[in-house]
Amino acid sequence: MLFSSRNTIHAFLIAILILATSCINKKQVSQNYICTSGIPIIDTLLISSESGNSELMDYDASTTDFIILKEDDNTMFADINQIIDAFDKYFIVDSYGSRRVVSFDHSGHPFASYGKHGNGPGEYIYPWDVDVNAQYVYILDISQRKLLRYNHKGDYIDSQNVPFDSKGFALLKNNKILFKLEPSKEMNYQLCVTDSALNPLSYMLHYPDGYIGGWVTDAVFQKNDKGISYYCSPADTIYRLDYDGNLIGKRLLNFKNGTIHTSAKINFIDAEQQGKLTSGMHLLNNPVELSNGTCFMEVTDYTNKGTYVIMLNPANGTHSAKKFADKMSIYDVIVPCVSSGNQIISYLDRIIADKCYNFDMMPDSLIKALNEGNRLLVIHNIH
């Protein structure tokens, strides 16, 4: 999941899923468009695959906790594309494998499942993105263009038709919703804020001319105490919004080995098929930011070939890079991940553990759980 097979799924899934085009009135879009010129630069993230100058990623057992996910028939899943830590529960999103959304309490005991694969009420085809508030769990089905709603116990409440193609959303204040839009002939805006009935209120950020895409970013929105981070790979800018849906800043990405071929930022699949991805770097997914400013991100480097997990803090200049490879440490596997305060939550199964040189050094109870097919959440406590 974390290696080349995962990258292939991301790059080509967009070619498999062909969605209907939007029918939004161009005049209305133009009237509701928010000018985004002059967005202030928050900082510049200097990204390198070199080992760096920080030991923050060299975890040991005293700074790491493991949660065994005790799946039952109601909460079994195949893979993890997103982890959400909210309201004393871990929500697991499996968009590709079992196509399920399930939850566990903070002890790892099964709590609930939300809907199932199908075409009926409360069912979905591709549960692509999920967000949660105190009352409800929302699931975006990109195949049927629906936003489904459940209570925390898993009871289906209702669904709404989404009026455009979208592969990501985030709940805002005052019952508003932020959507990431897919490009279409009708418009080339990246973001839309709607009211609770999914009526568009405003549009932001143009796609580049001729944009097609081709790389699918998990979790285009990441929430933290600084606001909402928006990133769609392989762009070179990360945007930040507040919880009212206003753009408040941007982070520029400065790759030490350079950026990837310009054509790949317009049409990633064509650039890959034409052999243009031979040098440069790009982020695979939206970086995760802790409350202390430390960012964790997954990066592909075509120059120094490999996939890396990079930690950096632009405020103090600390930086570290770990390459995904055989004989890595179990404490270096931190994707897919989510932040919770100053914690990074990641995922470990037996396949990944077999690639780690210190798997046999784990407590017997954890080895036994992995051998029996359980998966673990790995809680990295960053001090």
Image (cartoon, grey):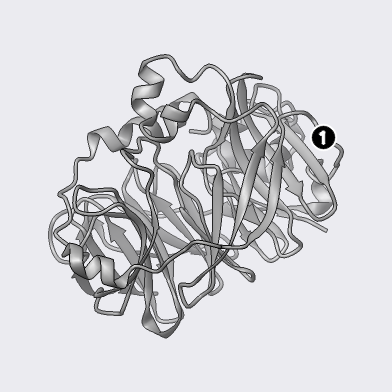
Residue that badge 1 annotates:
52
Tell me the SS state at disc 1: loop
Q: Say few, some or many: other residues with alpha carbon within 10 Å of mark 1 (under 14 / 14 to 19 / 20 or more).
A: some
Q: Is residue 33 above or below residue 330?
A: below
Q: Image quadrant of residue 272? A: top left
Q: Is residue 56 above or below residue 1?
A: below
Q: Residue at x 43, y 29 (%)?
A: 264
**Position of 309 compared to 126: left or right?**
right
Q: Nearer the viewer, residue 24 or 123?
A: 24
Q: Is residue 25 left or right of residue 68?
A: left
Q: Is residue 60 visible?
A: no
Q: Position of residue 168 (x, y in %)?
A: 37, 57
On the question of residue 216 being in view, the answer is: yes
Q: What percent of the width, then of the height, locates residue 89?
A: 52, 68
**Residue 124 or residue 30, whichever sits in front:** 30
Residue type indicated by callout 1:
Gly
Residue 213 versus residue 106 in the image, above or below:
above
Q: Is residue 341 above or below residue 368?
A: below
Q: Residue at x 81, y 56 (%)?
A: 315
Can you tell which quarter of the image residue 130 is in? bottom left
Which residue is pictured at 48% across the width and 41% down the height? Answer: 233
Q: Quadrant of residue 375?
A: top right
Observer-nearest residue: 226 or 191?
191
Q: From the image, which quarter does the C terminus lie in?
A: bottom right
Task: Tell which of 363 and 15 is nearer to you.
Answer: 15
x, y percent for residue 285 = 52, 44
